[in-house]
Image (tube, grey):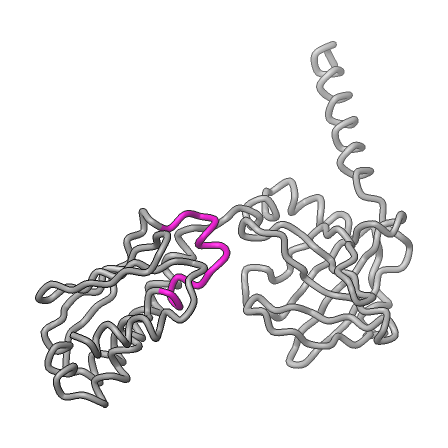
Amino acid sequence: MNPLQNTLLTIGILLSSTVASAVELAKYPKAYTANPGITVIVAPTQDGQQALVQMSGLNSERDDVMFLTDIESIGNSSEGYRTEFDGRRINLIIKNQGWGGEYLAIFPGGEKTILYFDEDKTEPLKPEHLLAIYNQQKADGVQEKLAKFDREKHVNLAVEGLKEADAEAAAACDSNIQTNVIWDSVSDDLLKSVSINGYCRTVVSELSSLCAESSDIKALAAQLETVNCRFGDSLKIDHDKSEVDFVTAKDEPNQQEFVKSYFRNL
């Protein structure tokens, strides 16, 4: 073996040692289950400040991923097992000392469920095996990819939700109205923090109700084809022939009443 090969081998051994020792797990990981078919493995670190958490049975991109979480106080005698996911810090599970140390799993949609200790699934768990899974996934970039904000995914979810609202308005108002979001007005931070679908569906949702109340509004709505929804600093609404221009704002209250009043007073 030549000197260069020796050097590369030494560097490889050092890097492997660094990766392997970066997380030191306590001796006794535990497995928990919840119906239907949810399994959660919790493997705390020796210092008790972090834990590896793996969730299975969610039918989501989180399934079987070994996340390194920070254990942080979140008030009310509770601790959150937090990690980076989709551009945000989220809790995968919550431990509440007031419930006798019970865990709650948090599903991708925000639903929570109590976890129950599973002795049969805990018995075969070995810290070194769990750490090997974590290190391999980390080397493959699995956690890093999931930690990044996926703007395209959030845009598509909003578009699909708006299609449902548009269909309801079309049926109620005998129209072909469609909501168009001006995406240049929606920053990543805004997309992370609010439901774009919830804000931008306001016009078609209120028209759905108003069309059932007023034949005049129904006649107007039947001529509408597009609702352009933009985010701004204050509420504004206007329409011209077949288009409605709606400016919504994150912190403005009573947006439904604002839209409803506009159409009632035309």
Magenta span = 186-199
Q: Residue at x 75, y 51 (%)?
A: 70
Which of 141 and 77 lies nearest the eye of the viewer?
A: 77
Which of 101 and 26 lies nearest the eye of the viewer?
A: 101
In this view, which residue lies farthest toward the top? 3
Image quadrant in which you'd find residue 238: bottom left
The vertical placement of 95 against 182, above or below, is below
Image quadrant in which you'd find residue 54: bottom right
Question: What x and y, as percent, mark residue 7?
Answer: 74, 15
The vertical placement of 112 against 187, above or below, is below
Which of 89 and 140 lies nearest the eye of the viewer?
A: 89
- Quadrant for the N terminus, please: top right
Residue 139 shown in magenta: no
Dominant secondary structure of the residues highlighted in magenta in the image = helix
Q: Is residue 257 left or right of 49 when viewed as pictured?
A: left
Q: Residue at x 78, y 27 (%)?
A: 13
In this view, which residue lies farthest toward the front? 265
Q: Residue at x 54, y 60 (%)?
A: 61
Residue 192 shown in magenta: yes
Q: Is residue 101 left or right of 93 when viewed as pictured?
A: right
Question: What x and y, as percent, mark residue 15?
Answer: 74, 29
Image quadrant in which you'd find residue 235: bottom left
The vertical placement of 109 against 187, above or below, is below
Q: Residue at x 78, y 26 (%)?
A: 14
Question: What x and y, as percent, mark residue 192?
Answer: 49, 54
- Quadrant for the C terminus, please: bottom left
